[in-house]
Each structure stands twice: as C-alpha cells, then as structure tokens.
Amino acid sequence: MSALKKFFKDTIIYGIAAILPRAINIGLVGLHTDVFKSNKFAENTEYYVYAAYLNALLTYGMETAFFRFFSKEKEKGKIISTSFITLLFTTLIFLALGLTFAPEITKTFGFKKVMYVKILVWTVFLDTIVVIPFAYLRVTNRPIRFAGIKIANILFLAVLNFLFLWAIPNGIISEGILPEPLNFYEKGEPQVIYIFLANVFASVFTLALLFPNILKIKWTFDQKVLQKLLIYGLPIMVGSLAYVTNENIDKLFLGDMIGATEMGKYSACYKLGVFMTLYITAFRLGAEPFFFNHAKEKNAKNNYATIFKWFSILGAIFMLVVVAYIDLFASILIRQDEYLDALAIVPVILLANLFLGIYNNLSIWYKLTDKTKYGMYISIFGAIVTIVFNLIMIEKIGFMASAWATLVAYGSMMVISYILGQKHYKVPYNIKQVGGYVILAAVLSAVSFYDGFRGNYIIATALVLLFLGIIYISERKELKRLLKK
C-alpha cells in the first residue's frame, strides 16, 4: 500500500471518528438552543472556554511530543509509560487542588455554583489521563478502535443530554430516577448544569473503554525520556494556550463588553463553523502520526505537498457549500430566531478556520525539525492579534469584530508559517495554484451570501457546480492518477 493511499485510508476512518461525534454534537446544539435562551447558552460557552484552557495547560504538549519520539526512539515502551505516568501524576495534583479550593475558584472566576467547578475539575482530569492511550491507538495504526471509542463516547453523551434536557422535563421519564443530589430542575425546567454532568459521565465511560489499554502500560519511568518530552512539548503547550486564546477569548470579551445575550448569539452561530472544524480535525488525526512516521521516506516532501494541495481544495469546497446553503444549515442547528442575528459571522469564521487548517498543514516543518519554539512564537503572535483587535473593535462593530479578529489572526499565522517553513524545511507547495482556488471559493461564497442571492438555492447550486467544474477541469489528470494509485 502506498504512503498516500494509507494516509487517505486512515484519514477517512479518523474522519468518521471526527464527523459522527460532531454531527451528533450539531444535534445537541439544536437541543441546547431550543431549551436555553442565549444568555444561558453563554453560561454554557463560558464554562467550556475554561475547560479548553485547562486541557491545553495540563497536557503541556505531551501528545505531540509522544508522536515525535515514539516514531524515532527504539525503546518505545519507555515513551509510552513515561508520558502516561507524568500526565497522570500532574493531573492528580490538579484534581486534589481543584476540589480542595473549589469555593475560592468559584468566587475568583465568577462561577454561579461550586458544583460547576467540581464538575469542571473532574471532567478535565478524566479527559487528560486518556490523552496518551488515545495517542497510542493513533500512532500504532489502530484507527478503527480509536473511532469506535470516540463514537461510543458521543452516543452516550447524546443519550444523557436528551434524558436530562428533554425526556425528564417533558414527562417521558420521571424525575424520580435521579438521586436527590443530581436533581437540579427548577419548576420542572432543566438547568445548564446537566450539560456539564453529561460530559463528566461520558468521560468516565470513555476511561472505562480505554482501561484495558491503560492496564497494558508498563510502569517504568525514565527521567531522560521525560526531559526530551518536556523540551519538545512545552513550547507546544504555550502554542496550544495561544490557540485556545484565539478560539475562545473573543467569547469572554463579548460577554464582558456587550453582554451575555450577544455572546450567546455569537457562540451559537460560531457553531456553524463546525463543518470546517470537522474536516480539519479528521485531517489532523490522520496527518500527525503520518507526517512523523514517513518523514524519512525519499518522496516525503512531495507527498506533503500533494496532501496540502488537496486538503486546501476540499476545505475550499466545504466553505463554499456551507455558505451557499447557510440558511438551510442554520434552520437545522439553531432553534430560536434570536440567535440568527449573528449569522453574518459564519462566512468569515469558515474562511478563518480554513486558514487555520492550512496553518496546521504547514506547521509540520517546525515539528519535524524539532523547532517547536517557532510554533510557540507564531501562536503567541496570533493570540496578540486576536486580543488587540477584539479590545479595539468590539465596541465599534460588536460581535463581527471577533469574527474578523479570528480571520486576521489565522491568516497572518498561516503566512508567517509558510515563509519560515520554506527557510527551514522547504516543501514544494504550489502556493499560487492553491491560493487561486481559495480566493475563488471565497469570492463565490461572498456572492452567494449577498442579499440578492442568499436563499436562492438555484444560484447557490450553480455556484457550487461552477467551482467543482473548475477544479475538475484543472486537476482531472492528477485526480485520476491519485484515484488509480
């Protein structure tokens, strides 16, 4: 099996692992926006912003460092055990401190209930200790088991959400099935805490599924291996924190500067960017271990260039399709009209996420050359752009400022990474061709979103077919060769 064929095969399986859970999550967004007003949805959003920061902090780049050294070190068992033991130890400390000081954390960060903090601490703890077991499944080419566990997790999560937010409030199932400490209904209405509870229960379920893999880990710790992992991984952690800032700080700013209601609208419509996120996640899950495992092959750089090109083309198609049929997707995902005020952010967010995906593709240069500090610098730069743009522009143009800030940040990160990458690890990317496709898709997306054309599905379909036709005419020879290969 050729390297590219194996890459695409694994990516399809990882794509299923990414798409099915996110597709179910899309349904949950519909449920959440139907049950809760935008100010309550903002409460939910703020909770997961803190969760994202904690996940980035507590994994401290260990996952990427694991991939890097597992592929190059002979004693792979030490890489597995040392990385897992280290994460387990630090996360247990976090668990103990978080539960002990939950009341103080609640007051400091403005959580409404101490229970919120305790659930958050448990969820982050459980999600962190499965990072290495999941990474091991990916690096040892076991995408089917990986996908199966991910899908089982989201199905369990969905069942709990529908139980807590729909079945019990509508009298399908009695409240009496819940033990008294978990009865958080006020006048029969569900509370946001049930979303948090569903997540922590789903995390316990995932840990149980991975437990057989965890038991196989040998309890050997190597200090020299840890030193290598930390030197490589800590800059990745800083970059991850900067990435979380790019993705989430806008929501906190919006809540503080123009109110929870506007933040809730923005956050709900931001979820429509999930289609691009699905695609990027599927690519990343398949690409990261592939790039490391095949770095020494003779035609590695040509393969990277080919993957980059088709990733960008497919991403441009995703963007155009979502924008062209945006009202249709919005009607499926968003149940209350008050949220639709922020729909104008979606085309901007989709293009921004495409830039992020391209940046992730380009970033392989600093991971393969062990120059992860550059990734840290680039991510910090993007975070500064996001913060400054939001602080200056939110009061002037509202939530659109946050969308444009995301686009400018990811666009600049993409350009900087390409320029530096060509100096340190030159890959023959066809930038002019790929750039032309992305610009064309952005222009056609803007045309379809224009007031005179928006909602006209004949025009939308014509624009999509036009773009697909141009791609086919331009790329038919290579496409046939790749499919044959």
Image (cartoon, rainbow, N blue to C red):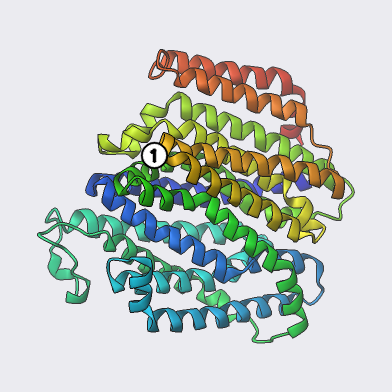
Residue found 65% across the figure and 69% down from its top: 62
Camera-side residue: 54 or 24?
54
**In the displayed image of the protein, which residue is found farthest to the right?**
298
Image check: 149 left or right of 232? left
**In the displayed image of the protein, which residue is found farthest to the left?**
187
User: Which residue position holds label 1?
Assistant: 269
Q: On the image, which quarter does residue 146 sit in?
A: bottom right
Quarter of the figure with the C terminus: top right
Image position, residue 211 (x, y; %): 51, 76
**How many numbered discs sit on the rendered protein?**
1
Residue 148, placed above or below residue 320: below
Residue 134, placed above or below residue 144: below
Image position, residue 403 (x, y; %): 49, 38
Image position, residue 174 (x, y; %): 12, 63
Q: Is residue 13 visible?
A: no
Camera-side residue: 187 or 217?
187
Image check: 264 left or right of 178? right
Residue 167, placed above or below residue 403: below
Residue found 51% across the figure and 50% down from its top: 247
Image position, residue 172 (x, y; %): 14, 56
Q: On the image, which quarter does residue 30 sit in?
A: top left
Tell me the amino acid under the disc marked 1.
Cys
Q: Is residue 231 visible?
A: yes
10 Å neighbourhood of mark 1: few (<14), some, or many (≥20)? many
Residue found 71% across the figure and 33% down from its top: 483
Q: Secondary structure at mark 1?
A: helix
